[in-house]
Image: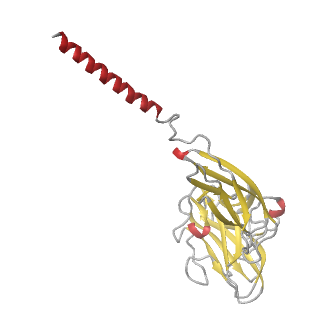
């Protein structure tokens, strides 16, 4: 009888030790067992790509790195450990690499990059499209389209916002741009609004006629938002080429490509307004017009 009791005790003790060992393993799973990296090296180099205008190769060190994100100033995007980027516009940039290691651990490193001149083909033709300074904002001329001035544009936080009390009030901004005959260009910009509208439009034109105060501009509509066409009824944020729904006059499709039958000056104009306008206004930034 005593032998059976001792055997049962020994079995119980062996099970307890085993369970304790399993619990100990579980406790160590997230701390110090080597499954999660604790120090991810995100260092990298930048090398100009020979024969390519304003194009650069970023090469990250790969030890302990299983993924990479790259940020040139517009937000981090998933990429490769060796990533080619194109920066068509002249300027001073900060390139940031986020290295992803085991278990999702990350490390960050940044390097400065100065682009001396804009790409003559793909450089942005729009001046002051980021609205960063008073000089940028001065590149734009306000086109007064509502007699009472109820609709207006404001400039702040590297953007421009159109405000309107509704009642069909509208307002425009524009600038002149030199173009080449039969050359194709793309137009785009970031647009956002935290709330929706009704009976509202946001339209982008690239016409040859000179804008005039008090005269609704209708020369060569390229793209836009329109609640009648089904966009801007709810909150939106993104590139107009993606969130817009207004058809291009030349192609009768939703397309942000334009070309012209003469070399010379055109006017890039944005006009916006409506009857039941969003209380938050519509904000635009990073306006671009580039050769293809």
Q: Is residue 232 left or right of residue 46?
A: left
Compared with 277, 241 (above or below) is below
Q: Residue 39: x percent and y percent?
A: 62, 42
Compared with 215, 40 (above or below) is above
Q: Residue at x 62, y 76 (%)?
A: 256
Camera-side residue of 15 and 189? 15
- Which colour style is shown? secondary structure
Q: Residue 2: x percent and y percent?
A: 18, 10
Q: Residue 24: x percent and y percent?
A: 42, 28
Q: Based on the displayed image, in which of its 4 quarters is residue 141 positioned? A: bottom right
Camera-side residue of 188 and 60? 60
Q: Is residue 233 left or right of residue 271?
A: left
* Residue at the far front in the pictured view: 3
Q: From the image, which quarter does the N terminus lie in?
A: top left
Q: Residue at x 53, y 59 (%)?
A: 234
Give the number of marks: 0
Q: Residue at x 59, y 77 (%)?
A: 255
Q: Residue 159: x percent and y percent?
A: 72, 59
Q: Is residue 221 visible?
A: yes
Q: Based on the displayed image, in which of its 4 quarters is residue 248 positioned? A: bottom right
Compared with 196, 5 (above or below) is above
* Residue at the far bottom in the pictured view: 261
Q: Is residue 216 visible?
A: no
Camera-side residue of 174 and 152? 174
Camera-side residue of 247 and 97? 97
Q: From the image, which quarter does the C terminus lie in?
A: bottom right
């Amino acid at each position: 009888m005593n032998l059976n009791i001792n055997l049962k005790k020994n079995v119980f003790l062996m099970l307890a030790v085993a369970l304790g060992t399993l619990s100990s393993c579980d406790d160590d799973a997230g701390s110090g067992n080597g499954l999660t990296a604790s120090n991810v090296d995100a260092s990298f180099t930048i090398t100009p790509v020979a024969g390519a205008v304003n194009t650069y190769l970023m090469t990250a060190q790969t030890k302990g790195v299983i993924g990479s994100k790259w940020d040139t100033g517009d937000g981090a995007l998933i990429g490769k450990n060796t990533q080619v980027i194109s920066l068509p516009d002249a300027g001073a940039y900060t390139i940031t690499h986020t290295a992803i290691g085991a278990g999702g651990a990350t490390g960050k490193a940044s390097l400065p990059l100065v682009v001396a001149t804009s790409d003559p083909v793909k450089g942005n033709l729009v001046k002051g499209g980021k609205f960063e300074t008073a000089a940028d904002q001065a590149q734009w001329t306000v086109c007064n389209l509502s007699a009472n001035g109820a609709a207006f544009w404001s400039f702040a936080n590297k953007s421009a916002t159109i405000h309107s009390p509704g009642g069909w009030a509208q307002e425009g901004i524009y600038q002149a741009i030199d173009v080449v005959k039969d050359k194709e260009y793309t137009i785009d910009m970031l647009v956002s609004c935290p709330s929706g509208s009704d009976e509202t439009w946001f339209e982008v034109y690239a016409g040859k006629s000179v804008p005039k105060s008090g005269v609704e501009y209708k020369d060569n509509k390229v793209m836009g938002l329109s609640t009648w066409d089904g966009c801007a009824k709810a909150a939106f944020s993104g590139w107009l080429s993606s969130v817009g729904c207004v058809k291009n006059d030349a192609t009768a499709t939703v397309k942000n490509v334009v070309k012209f039958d003469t070399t010379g000056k055109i006017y890039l104009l944005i006009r916006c307004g409506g009857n039941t306008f969003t209380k938050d206004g519509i904000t635009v930034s990073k306006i671009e017009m580039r050769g293809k």
